[in-house]
Amino acid sequence: DTEVTQTPKHLVMGMTNKKSLKCEQHMGHRAMYWYKQKAKKPPELMFVYSYEKLSINESVPSRFSPECPNSSLLNLHLHALQPEDSALYLCASSLGTGENTEAFFGQGTRLTVV
Amino acid sequence: SQQGEEDPQALSIQEGENATMNCSYKTSINNLQWYRQNSGRGLVHLILIRSNEREKHSGRLRVTLDTSKKSSSLLITASRAADTASYFCATEPFLQGAQKLVFGQGTRLTINP
């Protein structure tokens, strides 16, 4: 199984809502990532989990809250988002055991904040 | 911050022709990777070239890396309509390991039948 599965594929939420994005992989990867991508722009790193511990937070606003319940799952909890947070949110994983490893990406969740 | 810059931003060629995309970066790296993205969905890893390598091939793909110029190129030979996609280079900064990939701005490639 070489897939990273993200749910939901699409999400529309109001600025007062609380929602969660989910990501799952069963490749035994120990590094998992959240990226944000705006239209016609490259992915921008948000968070990195290494061995289920948060290792990088790229100064992301607190309305985005990551969680790694176990080595296969990664969540992104959303609360009080702004319309400018509308984007494609991509989850990725990699072996995480050293350098020179490729990342496997999910298909993304397209988020619209209204 | 995005350290990779790619050119051209957009490229349109006829099927069967070769497509070349370039990437420049600013800091020392462990490796440079190329990814493809179809229609704003997930990214697919194409090829990884390490900092001590100068050229690498995979099928119709050829990647070069010049660390003295901090630049890389991706050549797709004998292009097909299915190659239409956005292509991104991504660098793994030196000593930060697999934890951090920094993406370039991307090249939107269109293959005309």
Image: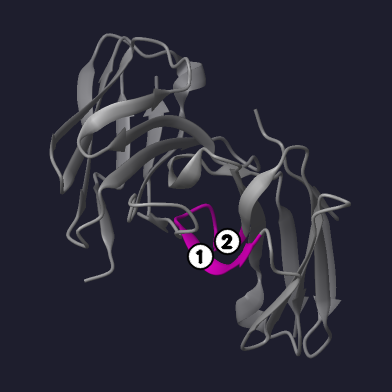
Query: Splitting the image into 4 quarters, where does residue A34 fall?
Result: top left
Instruction: State yes or no: discs 2 and 1 in contact (Cβ < 8 Å).
Output: yes
* Residue A24 image label: none
Identify the chain of the residue marked 2, using the numbered disc in the image: B
Question: Which amino acid does the dot numbered 2 rest on?
Answer: Tyr
Identify the chain of the residue marked 1, using the numbered disc in the image: B
What residue does disc 2 label? B35
In this rendering, the answer to whether B8 lies above or below B93 is: below
Q: Which residue is depicted at the point 46% across and 22% down?
A: A85
In this rendering, the answer to whether B36 lies above or below A79 is: below
In this rendering, the answer to whether A39 lies above or below B46 is: above
Q: Horizontally, is A104 left or right of B110 in the view?
A: left
Query: Splitting the image into 4 quarters, where does residue B34 fall?
Result: bottom right
Is the stretch drawn in magenta largely helix, strand or loop? strand
Pick whichever, B66 or B22, lies toward us.
B66
**x, y (%) of residue B19?**
81, 75
Residue B44 magenta-drawn?
A: yes
Q: Residues within 10 Å of mark 1 (few under 14, many from 20)?
A: some
What residue does disc 1 label? B45
Q: Quadrant of the N terminus of chain A?
A: bottom left
Q: Horizontally, is B107 left or right of A1 in the view?
A: right
